[in-house]
Amino acid sequence: MITKEQIAAEYQLIQDEICAALEQCDGLGHFEEELWERDGGGGGRTRIIQNGNVFEKGGVNFSAVHGQLPHNMKKALNVDQEDFFATGVSIVIHPNHPMVPIIHMNIRYFEMPSLSPEHEPLRWFGGGIDLTPHYVIEEDARYFHAYLKSVCDSFNHDFYNRFKTWADDYFFIKHRNETRGVGGIFYDRLTASDDISWESIFEFSKKLGRAFIPIYTELVKRNRDKQFTEQQQLWQYQRRSRYTEFNLVYDAGTKFGLETNGRIESILMSLPPTAKWVYNYKPEPGSEEEKTISLLKKGIAWV
């Protein structure tokens, strides 16, 4: 049986690999690391890149924390135990170029000890990856989803459709009636069953984590040298405001971090460096901005 220590060690390695590859992709920016400890147990490695050639702000964070869940989190998770362990890697990248998309990825593991010796610990894996283009480029969205489908299909042919629908529902800004971007995959409380073992779920988690670099570096390469206008950058800042709204209002990871006395700088590293809330902003009819809005909806079959 894989242990929480093995999982945390592999996640740290994935963090290292992603940071090195992103620095190479950017060519200028470098990650600054801050090691931190959590009051109550555990800690992590926050790594931030800022003001690069392409990446205006990004974070690739690892954490492994433990302690006791507050009462409201026990209720939210529908568990009776108090002691918990959670580890994961969380990534958000905000590019400085309107044609390069925002990307988010998270792989995580959660465990609570058994209340009695004859029972297994309560444990599950979760995670996902989603793409938030400022301008939806349909060819890029199809590439993104096809890559994720190939990862999912290598473990279970039901995963992609199941997790893609989950992402459409999760990354939805209800008060705007629009999806945050073009979706991706999302899953939570994934446990072993007759169809898949704990070891296979862990391998799936790692493969998803290692899909981040080939996916994102390809999208950066496709778009980083395109010319853009001041108006297009204004639109980028407007779209960033939607990203901010989702993370502050709906994001489960943000809520979990705040409720479990997590490190605030690490939790809010997902927020963009600059965003704008222009009052009652409406794109011009027939524009690329209007086209993007029309594609921010659930259920689009990208592959």
Image: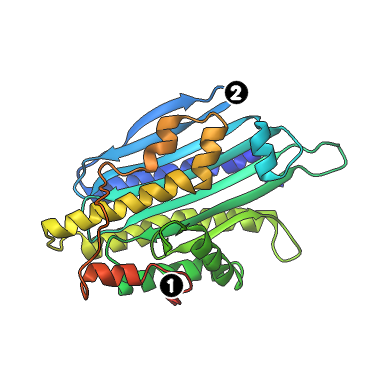
State the scheme by which the image is colored.
Answer: rainbow
Report the label total. 2
Judge by depth and name the residue closer to the eye, 8 or 105.
105
Q: Residue at x 48, y 44 (%)?
A: 89
Q: Residue at x 13, y 61 (%)?
A: 228
Q: Quadrant of residue 8?
A: top right
Q: Quadrant of residue 269?
A: top left
Residue 73 horizontal/vertical position (percent): 64, 38
What distance separates the C-alpha of mark 1 from that of mark 2?
Answer: 42 Å
Residue tagged 2: 40
Q: Identify the image quadrant of the C terminus.
A: bottom left
Number of the front mark, 1 or 2:
2
Determine whether the residue tagged by mark 2 lies in a helix, strand or loop.
loop
**Type of residue at label 1?**
Ala
Density class for disc 1 (Cα within 10 Å; few <14, some 14-19, many ≥20) is: some
Disc marking residue 146: 1
Q: In this orientation, does residue 214 appear? A: no
Density class for disc 2 (Cα within 10 Å; few <14, some 14-19, many ≥20) is: some
Residue 146 horizontal/vertical position (percent): 43, 72
Judge by depth and name the residue closer to the eye, 32 or 280.
280
Determine whether the residue tagged by mark 1 lies in a helix, strand or loop.
helix
